[in-house]
Image: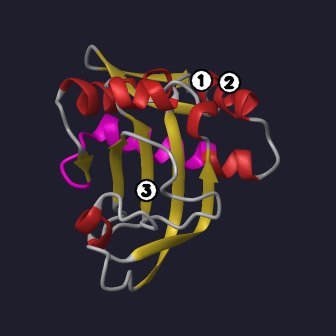
Amino acid sequence: MTPFRILTYKRTHTGDPDPFGNFGINDCMGAVRNRRFDAVIGVGGLGPEPKRWGIAGKLTWVGIGPRRRAGGNNHRGDIVSFDHFKLFDADGPDFRRLAPNLARRIFDGRVRALINGYSGAEFREAVGILRLTQMISAAMSIDSAVERLERGCGKSRTRVQNNRRRRTRCAATICN
């Protein structure tokens, strides 16, 4: 079984993907779109251009289950649409609040696109964002979905702390 691959990347502007979930219509991210992934998380960068578009530091879109078609002669990569797609653009939540570890990696590490090498915490946060998108797609508001993720799932789990096993309630931002 191949691992689930999530592409997380920084955006500088809106318009690609379009409101219908077509990623690459303006040839943004060029050949990066041709990498193999199972989901994409678009995040607004922190520079002047993302600020002008109102997307700086925000979760701007999520796509799950890519479907590819050739981009044509003027495109550096395929056009990718998705089985599940949610476009937030300027209405997206603060990415640092949703995924603090992944945000540090993306913003402080000057990473433009990440598909390999997630730490365990970063990957769990990325999966949590995918879950957030699925909750929103199930007619839940973005605010209530974010609140639910921040509250944790409430499941009991065993944690090892100071070499002792303890049963605790999950209060993590992201729960498996």
> Residue most toward the front?
74
Q: Picture coordinates of residue 158 (x, y %)?
A: 46, 31
Q: Amino acid at mark 2?
A: Glu
CA neighbours of label 1 inside 10 A, class few (<14), some (14 to 19), many (20+) = some
Colour setting: secondary structure
For badge 3, the amino acid type reads Val
In the depicted view, which residue is nearer to us: 131 or 10?
10
| Figure check: 3 above or below 133 | below
Looking at this view, is 174 or 99 the one in front?
99
Image quadrant in which you'd find residue 152: top right
Which residue lies at the image location 61% right of the left edge and 59% below the top edge?
A: 85
Looking at marks 1 and 3 on the same chain, the residue that comes earlier in the sequence is marked by 3
Which residue position holds label 1?
A: 150
Q: Are marks 2 and 3 in contact (CB under 8 Å)?
A: no
What stretch of residues is rendered in magenta? 115-132
Eyeballing the image, is 105 above or below 3?
A: above
The CA distance from mark 2 to mark 1 is 5 Å
- Residue 8 horizontal side relative to residue 80, left or right: left
- State the SS at label 1: helix
- All told, the count of numbered labels is 3
Farthest residue in the top direction? 162
Residue 57 visible here? no
Callouts 2 and 1 close, C-beta under 8 Å: yes
Q: Secondary structure at mark 2?
A: helix
| Mark identifier at residue 40 | 3
The chief SS type of the magenta part is helix
* Image x and y of residue 6, in percent: 36, 56
Residue 45: x and y in percent read 35, 32
Considering the numbered disc 3 on the image, is that residue within a helix, a strand or a loop?
Answer: strand
Q: Disc 1 to disc 3, how far (Cα)?
A: 21 Å
Q: Which mark is residue 147?
A: 2
The residue drawn where x is 26% and y is 19% is 163
